[in-house]
């Protein structure tokens, strides 16, 4: 099945891909193996870039940028439209490759590619709306305006968990803004990156635009460090851990470059006594177990009013018991594997720490044994989605950390102010939600003074996962402060220029200064 899929996507004949490669996920002799986390078996090998090939790529991207920026924005939009159409035609296969390579269930894999299609559609419209402003001048016969100009080759560093969509958020907007994208994907998902980038590259080239979408695949030491230190790359958009983001931001800041950071999340849901509890239950379960807890927007904390907590815990535990774990490509599966053994070990360490700190496991808490899944899945990294009740009135440090696994920590509260304080008590600030039937509680959570949720995303009566592309996506605090996707996120990929024109014949200075 994997070979047929690679054939359909044109990967078996790609110069980077080594079909039949038997090596593992650790780079060796300039090759990395892409491993299916559902089975533990290698799908194919991928040739890595070197310092020399990186240099060649950046030189191509720099030359392409000088040509691409001269293309009128609506014409650039036509190229993006064609890319979106081709992605739409290949959505099923690309979505299946996402599932195969990173373990998402098929619906999520296909849904991720749909996100890229959607942002392409958004970008097409945006190509006619890169608006500047006009401003009145204080000087007679003078005019002022601002315009937005292409920035340059954009470096995009993506994580394994969204190996298609996060590139799309960046690349489609950057393209209509007149920028070239140089993509460094995770070494855990290189095949998805090759297949996706090939779609964009081939479409653009067929329309006369070579070099608009470039790809570099390599280790952080060999390629990542070069990219973030490269002055020819004015913007680095990086998705990953908070630790990684701090390093990237320091290196880019040292050369006075720009960063767009999308880092970790420790997202919470508040459930009020008057909430629609069936709706809340569905939102919490999907938010906490979807993608096996490996989304930056995964629900990691539940903060529920003490008057309804016990009954909700019982329903939550029963719901977790019905979650089907297994082959992400099989119909009916709701939770696939963790990405690798390292992630499973992190899951086990977090559970052990939670118990040591007084937490009570209400559901899950262990791995799925090889005998509980089909024999072909015995090499996969499967764990049971877990609910842990926090100890009352005691510190619970493990809940301050983001464990990239399906662990939900649950807390109780008495007043909404107490719940919001607990909600905001973590270092990250990505996604947040409240379930309530009260307009007052909802508006308190969204308080425009800033005393409500301190996250970049705030939802009422829906969960923390599943952002739409129309709104800007990103978070505050240790989440990095970046914004991608919709709204005015396009401004990150351009530079602002204020223009003042003297159309008269007099010499006039601002602030009333006379120089005669």
Image (spheres, rainbow, N blue to C red):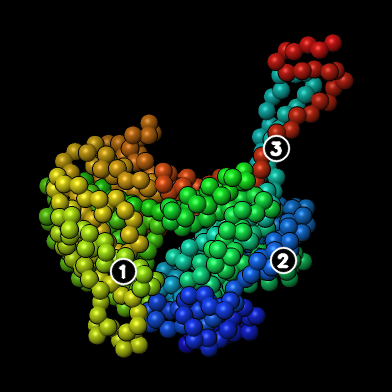
Q: Secondary structure at mark 3?
A: strand
Distance from Cα at disc 2 to Cα at disc 1: 39 Å
Dot 3 crowding, Cα within 10 Å, few <14, some 14–19, many 20+: few
Res 185 visible: no
Is disc 2 in contact with disc 1, using a CB cutoff of under 8 Å? no
> As drawn, which residue projects farthest toward the right?
505
Q: Secondary structure at mark 2?
A: helix
Q: Residue at x 25, y 58 (%)?
A: 408
Task: Say which quarter of the image contains residue 140.
Answer: top right
**How far across and down, in percent of the image, does residue 156 sit?**
57, 58
Which of disc 1 and disc 3 is earlier in sequence? 1
Where residue 345 is drawn, which disc sits there?
A: 1
| Mark 3, residue position | 497
**How far across and down, in percent of the image, does residue 110 sit?**
46, 71
Residue 13 relative to residue 333: left or right: right
Image quarter in which the C terminus is found: top right
Residue 274 relative to residue 3: left or right: left
For the residues carrying marks 3 and 1, which lies nearer the camera in this image? Answer: 1
| Mark 2, residue position | 56
Q: Residue at x 47, y 55 (%)?
A: 244
Which of disc 1 and disc 2 is earlier in sequence? 2
Q: Secondary structure at mark 1?
A: helix
Which of disc 2 and disc 3 is earlier in sequence? 2
Distance from Cα at disc 3 to Cα at disc 1: 50 Å
């Amino acid at each position: 099945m994997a070979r047929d899929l690679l054939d359909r996507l044109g990967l078996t004949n790609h110069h980077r891909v080594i079909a039949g490669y038997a090596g593992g996920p650790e780079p060796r002799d300039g090759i990395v193996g892409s491993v299916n986390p559902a089975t533990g078996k290698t799908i194919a090998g991928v040739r890595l870039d070197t310092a020399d090939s990186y240099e060649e790529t950046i030189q191509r991207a720099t030359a392409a940028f000088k040509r691409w920026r001269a293309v009128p924005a609506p014409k650039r939009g036509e190229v993006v439209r064609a890319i979106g159409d081709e992605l739409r035609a290949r959505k099923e296969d690309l979505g299946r490759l996402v599932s195969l390579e990173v373990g998402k269930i098929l619906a999520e894999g296909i849904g991720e590619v749909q996100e890229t299609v959607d942002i392409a559609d958004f970008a097409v419209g945006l190509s006619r709306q890169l608006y500047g402003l006009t401003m009145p001048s204080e000087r007679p016969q003078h005019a002022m305006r601002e315009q937005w100009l292409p920035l340059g080759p954009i470096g995009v560093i993506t994580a394994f968990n969204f190996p298609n969509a996060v590139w799309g958020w960046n690349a489609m907007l950057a393209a209509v803004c007149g920028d070239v994208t140089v993509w460094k994907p995770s070494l855990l998902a290189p095949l998805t990156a090759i297949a996706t980038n090939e779609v964009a590259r081939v479409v653009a080239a067929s329309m006369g635009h070579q070099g608009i979408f470039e790809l570099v695949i390599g280790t952080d030491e060999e390629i990542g460090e070069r990219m973030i230190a490269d002055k020819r790359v004015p913007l680095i958009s990086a998705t990953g851990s908070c630790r990684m983001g701090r390093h990237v931001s320091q290196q880019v800041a040292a050369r006075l470059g720009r960063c767009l950071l999308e880092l970790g999340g420790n997202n919470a849901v508040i459930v009020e006594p008057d909430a629609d509890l069936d709706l809340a239950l569905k939102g919490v379960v999907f938010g906490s177990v979807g993608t096996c807890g490996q989304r930056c927007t995964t629900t990691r904390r539940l903060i529920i009013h003490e008057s309804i907590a016990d009954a909700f815990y019982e329903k939550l535990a029963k719901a977790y018991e019905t979650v089907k774990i297994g082959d992400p490509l099989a119909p009916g599966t709701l939770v696939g594997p963790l990405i690798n053994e390292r992630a499973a070990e992190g899951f086990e360490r977090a559970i052990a720490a939670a118990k040591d700190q007084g937490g009570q496991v209400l559901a899950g808490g262990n791995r799925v044994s090889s005998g509980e899944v089909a024999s072909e899945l015995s090499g996969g990294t499967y764990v049971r989605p877990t609910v842990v009740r926090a100890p009352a009135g005691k510190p619970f440090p493990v809940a301050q950390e983001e464990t990239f696994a399906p662990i939900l920590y649950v807390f109780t509260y008495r007043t909404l102010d107490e719940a919001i304080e607990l909600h905001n008590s973590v270092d990250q600030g990505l996604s947040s939600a409240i379930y309530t039937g009260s307009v007052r509680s909802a508006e308190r959570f969204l308080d425009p003074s800033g005393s409500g949720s301190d996250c970049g995303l705030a939802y009422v009566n829906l969960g923390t996962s599943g952002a739409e592309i129309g709104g800007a996506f990103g978070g505050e605090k240790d989440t990095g402060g970046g914004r991608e996707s919709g709204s005015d996120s396009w401004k990150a990929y351009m530079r602002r220029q204020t223009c003042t024109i003297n159309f008269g014949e007099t010499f006039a200075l601002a602030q009333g200064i006379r120089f005669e």
